[in-house]
Image: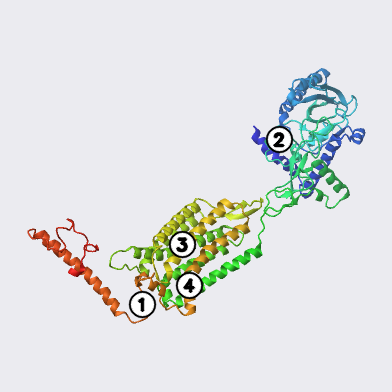
Amino acid sequence: MRAPRRVTSLLLPFALLSLPHANVANVTTYREELESSLRLVHAVATGATGALCVTHHYGRLRAPMHASRWDTARARADLAANILHQLGLETAEVLMAVSRGLVIGGSASERAVGARALALRSDGVVNSTVEWERYGVAEPVAVVSPQLEKPPDPEYPWYVSAEESESLRSPKFMPSLPGATMEGWWTYPYYSCEAKRWLLSYTVPVSTIRGLKGVVSVDIDISNLEINQCEVDNDEENDNQIYSFHGTHKCPNETTYCEYKPNREISVRYSGWARGSYICRCRPGFYSMHHPEGFNGSLVEIAYQEYEESSLENWSEPYDCLQCQPGCETCKGPEPCLATYNWPFRISLLVISVSCAVMTVLLTIYTRHHRRVKVFRVASPVFLSITLLGCAIMYMEMAAIFPVLDRYSCIATKWTRHMGFCITYTALLMKTWRVSLTYRVKSAHKLKLTDKQLLQWMAPILLIMLVYLGTWTLSAPPDAEVITDNRGLKFKQCTYNWWDHSLAIGEILFLLWGVRVCYRVRHAESLYNEARLISIAIYNIFTVNSLMIAFHLLILPRAGPDIKYLLGFIRTQLSTSTTVLLVFLPKVLRVVRGTGDTWDSRARARGVPASSSLNGIGLVPDEPPDLFQENEELKEEVQKLAAQIEFMKIVQMEMHNRHLRPRPGGYFTTNAANVPQSPMHAKTVNISQV
């Protein structure tokens, strides 16, 4: 039963405005009438009713309201009118019984405080009248009735002449709802000076019978209602409020909002009937230094009334809230909420990083140009170029995190950081791994791993990183989230979730594997000390990344954006620039000094063979081959092979000729071990006997 009421409550003001000739003027008039009604409410609430109650006895509001809550009283009034029409209006006893039933028959919740029944002759003079007051519930309310042998006072809110009642256009009555089944009309709310209450009356005309017309009226006490001038979303929860006044507050809507607060300080009995019973509070994103709790609605209403009376300009300026600083959802003052960016500082770091990336590209061209120089050739120009490519990508991370972060910059950050690391670190690790495999081989045959073979092993690692980053970007692209620094200032940082954690764990394991490989080749000798320098670079990358993780997560978790940018710059320089300097600076210096094509004399002095070069293809000699040395090496290999053949021949002979005894001094003697040993063992092989 309440759902239709909610709909009609929202449509009733428009129903009033949808009368014939409704236009902009009607809207303006309706608002002016509401403002006039609010001024009357304010006068009654403050006791300024002298002029009203001296010249008039009633103060009518032009504010429609819901009357369906008193449908029971209305139905009894309609029934009383029908009874009077059937019984006639000549006898006062009938009128008395009807009016008495209207008052006494109702419950206390209906707040019916009085009723009257009139019998009028054709000339409008009162023939008879009866009124009843309600006793026993609070104070009785005086019920005013017209005098006999006189026309009713036109000022009565509940009475209109017969001509007006037939036209249904009396301004004293509220417009009826479409489809309402009522035989009478509800008056607008009015204030009775004699009763000193706010009342609402329902009037039912009685059709003419035997020359007399009748009027039945019942008064409802509405002093317990409230005037809420704020906007209301759910009308069902505000049955005790007059809906016409909803939205009539004077709060500046751009910066404040209205919050209903019944004024309990008014020294009247019914505080719900008060203008300005609200507080203008600052909207989110606005503040007031002098009125942090909001502006009193009564003062705002007075200022608006002065504006209407004297056309004051900027009347609402004292009640406007000031806008918070950018980025503040709420604030209490003009303090900033966003962390400031030191752009000159960030630009200087960005210029250095971009310059390093450009220099890395130039170094790649330089390496490619001098790829036939021995100092570059023994280090594998292909992997040197790949290493420089990864370093250039890592440098560009500083450009990705330079602006205020958003989704696209975060995606670029993840790709440059992790892809650059994977390319650089994998290239260095492949070269070190080749040294490890070569160093661990103990056979006479030399193990040769070409660049092509290493690239085939490197490709799956890069492919895994590509697939991971691509899946991450497509399924759950990293975005920027708002965080606060240690001063509570907000700034944006790329989100960290299980994608980051999983990749970080994988990179740590990858770094640990690289550290293990470097540890295994710590004693390996290589030309130009290449393996040792690469190992130092790998150790440095592992140390720097571990320290930076500790700084970000443990030491400076709430650092500001500039500090985080500086930490990123330091990490890039310590890991990337140090790697470039360790791997490429000695080579460039040799080329500049003109010794790039000269063999590493110290490595040759330590006996480092040609197979220890990092490109896996040996060296191209720069002088005629040493025939004596090569002859000695070949003789040594031939002797080893001959010893192996002799050993196998004797073993086979002994197995198939067990009656023969071993030759004294041979491989098998009575003093020898029962189990044959390897010909490579120094105590077993006797080359002089071959």
Residue located beneath label 2 in the image? 238
Would you say 464 lies left or right of 355 here? left
Residue 353 location, x and y as percent? 57, 67
Would you say 251 lies left or right of 309 here? left
Mark 1: few, some, or many residues within 10 Å (few <14, many ≥20)? Answer: few
Gap between marks 4 and 1 measured at Cα? 20 Å
Task: Please report contact status of discs 4 and 3: CB closer than 8 Å, yes or no.
Answer: no
* Number of callouts: 4
Select label 2 or label 4 by which is in front.
4
Instruction: Identify the mark nearer the N-term, 1 or 3.
Output: 3
Secondary structure under the numbered disc 4 in the rendered image: helix
Amino acid marked by disc 1: Val
Amino acid marked by disc 4: Pro
Assign the C terminus to one quadrant of the image.
bottom left
Instruction: Identify the mark nearer the N-term, 4 or 1.
Output: 4
Amino acid marked by disc 3: Ile
Secondary structure under the numbered disc 1 in the rendered image: loop
Residue located beneath label 4 in the image? 586
Height in image: 682 above or below 303?
Answer: below
Instruction: Identify the mark nearer the N-term, 4 or 3.
Output: 3
Height in image: 432 above or below 3?
Answer: below
Mark 4: few, some, or many residues within 10 Å (few <14, many ≥20)? Answer: some
Instruction: Identify the mark nearer the N-term, 1 or 2.
Output: 2
Select label 4 or label 3 by which is in front.
4
Would you say 16 lies left or right of 486 here? right
Instruction: Identify the mark nearer the N-term, 2 or 3.
Output: 2
Gap between marks 2 and 4 measured at Cα? 85 Å
Q: Can you tell which mark lies on residue 620?
A: 1
Does the rendering let one see residue 435?
Answer: yes
